[in-house]
Image (cartoon, rainbow, N blue to C red):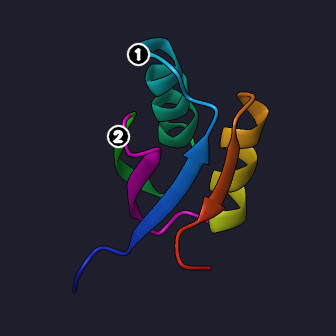
Amino acid sequence: MTTPTTELNITGMTCGHCVKAVEGALRAIPGVQTVTVDLAGGRATVQGDADRNAMLAAVTEEGYSAQVAGA
């Protein structure tokens, strides 16, 4: 069985601190296994069966805008 992967488009990230803030917020969500944030591409790739709305809320709480890629 493959691990679900969610791609998020994130706007507002400008530096490494932003990347760490987003990574930390996403990793704190139950069900998240791995997080990879691409600053240049404005994307986060999340593996795990975490709730998508919880992911969006966590990123928003850090001060960035997020949406599920392709949604």
The quadrant of the picture occupied by the N terminus is bottom left
Q: Is residue 59 left or right of residue 35?
A: right
Residue at 75% x, 29% y: name it. Answer: 63
Please say whether residue 38 is visible from this viewpoint: yes
Q: Is residue 22 magenta?
A: no
Q: Position of residue 19 (x, y in %)?
A: 45, 26
Decide whether residue 44 is among the magenta residues: yes
Rendered view: 13 above or below 7: above
Nearer the observer, 6 or 48: 6
For disc 2, the neighbor class at 10 Å (few under 14, some 14 to 19, many from 20) is some
Q: Which residue is mark 1?
A: 16
- Give the SS element for disc 2: strand
- Rendering quarter of residue 6: bottom left
Q: Amino acid at mark 1?
A: Gly
| Relative side of 55 to 69, left or right | right
Residue sitting at x 45%, y 21%: 20
Residue 30 shows in this picture? no
Counting residues from the start of the chain, the first of labels 1 and 2 encountered is 1
Indicate which disc residue 4 carries.
none
Tell whether label 2 touches label 1 (CB within 8 Å).
Answer: no
Would you place residue 8 above or below residue 38 in this image?
below
Coordinates of residue 50 in the picture (x, y in percent): 54, 63
Residue at (40% x, 56% y) in the render = 46
Q: Which residues are magenta?
A: 40-51
Q: What kind of element bears circle 1? A: helix
- Type of amino acid at the residue the image marks with label 2: Asp
Q: Residue at x 47, y 69 (%)?
A: 49
- Disc 1 packing (10 Å; few <14; some 14–19; many ≥20): few
The Cα atoms of the two marked residues, 1 and 2, are separated by 10 Å
The numbered mark at residue 38 is 2
Image quarter (top left, top right, bottom left or bottom right) of the C terminus: bottom right
